[in-house]
Image (cartoon, helix red, strand yellow):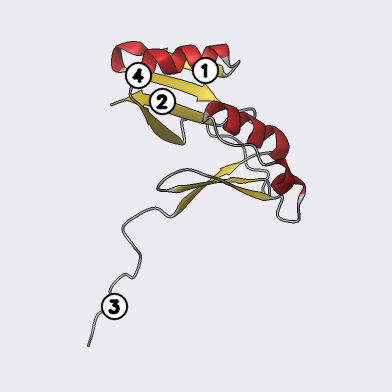
Amino acid sequence: MKTLESRLEKRVGSIFIHVSDMKRAVEWYSRVFDLPYNDDYIEGRLSTIYNLPFKGTGVLLDSNHGAAPSPQPIMFFKTDDIWHTLQFLKKSGITVHKEILEDNIVIIEDPDGNRLTAIQM
């Protein structure tokens, strides 16, 4: 008898971040990651899913569900300078939840309370 093998790829395709207000979320993520802001897409027929133009694994904002935010960080992003990143976030009015600078970690919150981590590696 032949056994079945998994056909799942060993990589993440995309990650969903559940948001309650798509326009506010797109503005926030565009500001934090210095991304182009595409207001036309938000107002269009596909306004419940927004694909953030990241390299590698996709990050999708999803307003289809009323999921509660996670009290733990849902993902992390690399930075080459945690101090510069922290100053940029504060100057941009981003909520900094926690600074663990001895470990080169900063945890921020999006407008829905989803927590993201910046790590200098």
Q: Residue furthest toward the left?
A: 1
Disc 3 residue type? Leu
Contact, CB < 8 Å: mark 3 with mark 2? no
Instruction: Name the residue at 52% across, 17% down.
Output: 89
Residues at marks 3 and 2, CA–CA distance in whole angstroms: 40 Å
Other residues around mark 2 within 10 Å, as few (<14) / some (14–19) / many (≥20): many
x then y, percent, for residue 23: 72, 37
Contact, CB < 8 Å: mark 2 with mark 1? yes
Camera-near label (3 vs 2) is: 2
x then y, percent, for residue 8: 35, 65
Question: What number is the disc on residue 4?
Answer: 3
Q: Look at mark 1 in the image and give the residue it sits on.
A: 89
Contact, CB < 8 Å: mark 4 with mark 2? no
Disc 4 residue type? Asp
Instruction: Name the residue at 56% across, 31% down.
Output: 114
Q: Nearer the viewer, residue 103 or 59?
A: 59
Instruction: Name the residue at 76% across, 52% down.
Output: 44
Query: Quick one: label 2 or label 1, which is nearer the N terminus?
Result: 1
